[in-house]
Image (cartoon, rainbow, N blue to C red):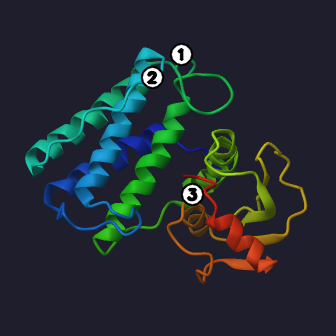
Amino acid sequence: MTEINFLAVVERETERFAVMLETADLGVPVPTCPGWSLHDLADHVGGVHRWARHAIVEGVEGDDPPAAPGDRAGLVDWYRESAAGLLAALRELPADAPAWHFGTGPQVAGWWRRRQAHEITMHLWDARNALGGGEPVDPVLAADGVDEARHVFFPRQVRLGRMPALDRSLAVVVAETGRRHVFSGDGTGTSGEEPADATVTGPAEALLLALWHRIPADDPRLLVEGDRSAAIEVLSAKVTA
């Protein structure tokens, strides 16, 4: 599989997000983030950039950052500062430098390159969708996002008590690669070969969007085999957030 330059993704997509904020209607609702306007989404994304930067530079989890300014000029400047600070930290610290993160494995700064690449990609998709247009998510990046959903977010959600362990199981198969991920139990199984009550196969982008509750289980791009009710139950669970 093609290696992903996560830092390049963060650089490119944060700039696209900033440019969009310069002219878009900041009051438009964001359907995939219920209750949020585009301004609210920008406030969230910029805040996450600042939160991640603190974890990278200080090595520990920080508090929630201050809210973004309400006016367009202030918001754009604030967002650009947020992105620039994150990018500086990601560029300047070695990937193996000690840094807090919420995943498992070594607590190192490089972990955040992947996470922030997926963060900005998903929320740029949210923004473009709200504005009535958009571009597809790169299939290689989307396939990695499916892996992150399975191995980073799902077990974390159970571990933090945000959802119970799954009673039913779902295999997710990425059409472009054939890679199979199984969502079952508390998420600690890792082989991908476990039996499952149902299987959903589809393009990497569609699977990623379904796991993040951006599209429904009955989206025509998704092929569900086996117990359909099990597939719907797992895809409706808080396996990501």
Q: Are marks 2 and 1 in contact (CB under 8 Å)?
A: yes
Real-space Cα separation, disc 3 to disc 2, in angstroms:
24 Å
Residue at the image point whose x is 14% and y is 60% from the top = 23
Tell me where residue 226 appears, x and y as whole percent.
83, 78
Residue at the image point whose x is 35% and y is 47% from the top = 12
The amino acid on which the numbered mark 3 sits, given as a three-letter code, is: Ala
Which secondary structure lies at badge 3? Answer: helix
Which secondary structure lies at badge 1? Answer: loop
Instruction: Check disc 2 and report the residue beneath it.
Output: 56
Instruction: Check disc 3 and report the residue beneath it.
Output: 142
Q: Earlier in the sequence, mark 3 or mark 2?
A: 2
Left or right of 31? Residue 209 is right
Task: Find residue 107 and name its label.
Answer: none
Left or right of 19? Residue 209 is right
Of 135 and 228, nearer the camera is: 228
Instruction: Check disc 1 and report the residue beneath it.
Output: 97
Tell me where residue 207 appears, x and y as whole percent.
62, 66
Tell me where residue 13 appears, x and y as whole percent.
36, 49
